[in-house]
Amino acid sequence: MAISPPFPPYPPDPGTAAEGSGLRHAHWWQHKWVRYGALITLLALSGLVILALVREQTGTQGFLVGLGLAILPVPLLIAAFRWLDRVEPGPWRNLIFAFAWGACAAALIAIVANSFATRWIATSTADPSSADTLGATVIAPVVEESAKAAAVLLVFLFRRRDFTGLVDGVVIAGVTATGFAFTENILYLGTAFGTDQLSGDSGIASVTAATFFVRVIMSPFAHPLFTVLTGIGFGIAALSGEGRRVRRVLLPLGGLLLAMGMHALWNGSSVLGAWGFFAVYGAFMVPAFGVLTWLVVWTRQRELGTVREELPAYAAAGWITPAEPYALGSMRARLLARKYARQHLGKPAGRTVAQYEAYATSLAFLRHRGRLGRAGADFVSRERELLNELWRRKDVARPALEHAARMTAPPVPVTVPPWPVHGMYGHPVPGPYPHPGPVRPGPYGGYGSPAGYGAAGGSGSYGSHGAPGGPGTHGAPGAYGSYGGQHPHAAGPAGQHGYAGQPGHMGQPAPVGGPGYAGPPAPAPPGHPAPSGHAGSPGHTGLPTHPGHTPYG
């Protein structure tokens, strides 16, 4: 019996050699470290300049008071956006860049441009009062929202792999606006404190208290709410196919215009008096905040549904176990899996499970885009990369996810056999984790119990697909046994009971534009891709079978 290589037999990436040779002759300014260095230098200089400007306007004492008060809502807002991004968490470096851009670069652009425009209007019209009003309601929304949108645009263009949908746009835009509001609040609160120092006011009647109440208590979400509209435009554009260039340009512009309009409405409410301000707050700001919150939470739940719908194809091909789509589609199950891994194998195992969850989610989203005809030219290489990352972490992640699936699945009636069955009711499951005791049956018949499928003969461990068939066949139905630590294709004990496996088939047709798979599983000879294929993404030749299958049953 021939043994396949430890990783799936993919064809070589045609662009690998060319890319390697290109990097060898790249100019110095094309190196990644040069771009990173330039970006860090730009943000650092912007931060130093904005620090000097704010301190000049507020004084040292006012700056420190403003800093202490302005930082209070920041952890809550960052935690809220990070919670939204838990299904497919983006890298922290993107969030750090977004916050730094908003707090330093965007704030510097806004202060300089707003001051210049307001002074120019005041000089041209000889009416400083109307210049301030026009600057707050027209100039400031255009300048500030454009400056914040630049961060979303940069992530969209240069971190396209991390920017795959609406939630990514909301998170990047919201974190950018949080950084911008942080710097702006330091300026306003520090200035208010300086005013109180001159007038002698203190306590609740002070200008500082009123400014804190309006900007930090009532509307900490104001700037994030405006910029999130821009992020939604970029997020919907990210879901569009690469061929729809007009749509990918108009959607972000439409979101930016909406952000400017809402920002102008909010700033303009200050000239309407106290009642006008509260009317705009209650009639527009609060409902808009509620609708957008519902939208992003609904999108988050929809992403979990996408994980549950797309991953079973990879379970059929043997890359993941049948329990994993259910566990990966539940945030509670994910948390239990990470906790289980940390308790039994330490913190590194918990991080490994978290990485496994992230890669599996990215794989589900990638397949979903491919099925809808929106996959990019790198579909095959990206799918290969994600599958290999999952395979490297499977020994630690699979038992934890299967435990989480058992603990979170709804109860299913299971007929308990009189003979011992590995994997349930006190019989230990082989693997790297100690047996935690009796487990609750889950939706897969207790993970190794017959569950109404009867006894199955032949090879028993998970991953085998029946006895070798004759020429042209794909094997008779095999028995799926326990999910323990055995190699997926090691022969199990004769007569071990599980649920009967499906006979292999030549492949079900893929929807137009979506990746197909060649049956559960469709073995491929070493060095050749799996048969059948992706009907829409060029070069995709079908869902790969997992490593370990023999060439012909």
Image: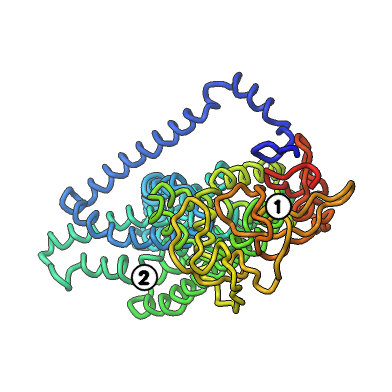
**181 or 496, nearer to the observer:** 496
Q: How many marks?
A: 2
Mark 2 vs mark 1, foreground winner is: 1
Real-space Cα distance between discs 2 and 1?
70 Å
Residue 233 in sight: no
Q: Indicate the position of residue 402 as horizontal and vertical percent values.
A: 54, 61
Check the image and tell me how it is coloured: rainbow
| Residue that lies at the very extreme toward the right in this rendered image | 472
Q: Nearer the viewer, residue 551 or 294?
A: 551
Is disc 1 placed on a helix, strand or loop? loop
Drawn side of residue 234 relative to residue 95, left or right: right
Please say if 17 is above or below 546.
above
Residue 453 figure quarter? bottom right
> Crowding at label 2, few (<14), some or many (≥20) Cα neighbours within 10 Å?
some
Q: Determine the secondary structure under disc 2.
A: helix
Res. 211 visible in picture: yes
Q: In which quadrant of the rendered image does the N terminus lie?
A: top right
The quarter holding residue 321 reads bottom right
- Determine which of the numbered discs, if any, sits on residue 270 in the image: 2
User: In the image, which disc is placed on residue 464?
Assistant: 1
